[in-house]
Image (cartoon, helix red, strand yellow):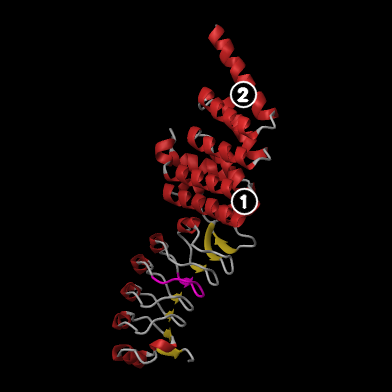
Amino acid sequence: MEFALNKMSSIENLIAIIENSNNNIERLESIRNLSNILGNSDKLFKILENLLISDSDEEIRCLAAEVLGKNFCEKLFEPLIWAIQHESSSRCLNIVFSSLIYHMEHLDELIDQDVTSKLLEYINNITDKEFKIALKSLFEKTSFQKMQFDELNDLLFNFISLSYLKKKFWRLKYKIEDLKVIKIDFIFKGLTEIPEPIRYLKSLKELSLKYNQITILPDWCGTLTSLERLDLSQNRINKLPNSIKHLQSLKILNLEGNELSFISDSISSLNSLEILNIKSNSIEQIPKSLASLKTLRELHVGAYSLVNIPDVIKDMEKRDLKIFFESI
C-alpha cells in the first residue's frame, strides 16, 4: 500500500515539474523518469501528445517525439502526423519523420491487427485539406476497400514525405495526382545532398534539383523507377552511381554544369532515354557504349568532347540523332 502511494506521489511530482518548472534540464529528466514508471500507459501518452503539440521548448518537443516513437506504436500516428505538418523545429521535424517512416516500414510487426484496416484508418483520419480534396477525387475513381496494402502504404509514404518536404523547404513546387507526388522542383534550395524523403516518392515522374551544391547521388536514386525527367544541372556532381541504370522510364537526363570527368556505362542501360545533356563538365571523351541508346534523339556535349566523339556515335546521326556542341 505504502509503495503504491509513494509511486503515485512520485508520478504527481514528476508531472508537476514537467508542467510548471522553468528548469529545462529538470523537465527533460522528469519526462525520462515518468516514461520509465508509466511505460506505454494512456496517461503518459496524453502527456507526451500535449507536449509535442503545444510545448514552446524545442528540446521538450524532441524528447516527446522520441518517446512516442519508442513506446506507442499503436497510437503514435495521429500526433506525429499533426507534428510533421506543423512543427517549426528542423531537428524535431527530422525525429518525427524518422519515427513515422520506421513505423510505416515495420507496420506488420508493430500492429496487432489487420494492417490493411489500420492503413485505411490512418488515411481516413488525416485532416489535411489538400489531402482530403485529393482523397475525395480518388474515391470517385476507385474504392479504398479494394486497394491492396502496398497501394495504401504508398499513399501514406507520399503524404508523410511531402508533408516533411513542404515544412523543410519554403515555397516548394510540386504536383500531385491521385494522392501521389509526380513532380517536384528543388531549384535554388541550397542543397548539398538529395533529401532522403524523395526516395519514398515511387510515383515521381519529374525531379528537378538544378542550381544547388549537390556532390553525389545516393544509391537509392535507382529506386525511382517512374522517373521520366531528371534535372541535375548546375551542381557539383563528380560521379554517377551504377544504380542509375535502373531508371528505365527516364527520357530526359540533364547533367549540364557539374564536375563529371567521365560518363558511366550505366547510362547506356537507360533504354528510354531521348535527351542527354552533359555540357559544361570535364568530360574529354564520349563512351562508345552510348551507341546502344536506340531511343536517343538529342546529345548535348561540351567543348572538351568536341574532338573525342567516336565514329560509332557520329554514325548515330544517320538515324536522326542530333548532336549539339557547346560553344568554346
Q: Please tell me whether residue 234 is drawn above or below residue 326 in the rendered image.
A: above
Q: Could you say where residue 253 lies in the image, as x and y percent from the top left?
A: 44, 75
> Given the image, on which type of amino acid does mark 1 rest?
Lys
Q: Could you say where residue 118 lies in the image, as x and y percent from the top left?
A: 49, 39
Q: Residue at x 50, y 48 (%)?
A: 144
User: Which mark's residue is nearer the viewer, 1 or 2?
Assistant: 2
Along the polypeptide, which appears first: circle 1 or circle 2? 2
Instruction: Name the residue carrying label 2.
Output: 14
Instruction: Name the residue carrying label 1.
Output: 132
Q: Please tell me whether residue 194 is drawn above or below residue 57 in the rendered image.
A: below
Q: Which residues are magenta?
A: 228-239
- SS for tag 2? helix
Q: Please tell me whether residue 89 is drawn above or below residue 169 in the rendered image.
A: above
Residue furthest to the top: 1
Q: Residue at x 58, y 36 (%)?
A: 64
Asked whether 236 falls inside the magenta stretch, the response is: yes
Q: Could you say where residue 147 lies in the image, as x and y percent from the top left?
A: 46, 49
273 sits to left or right of 2 = left
Q: Nearer the viewer, residue 151 or 24?
A: 24
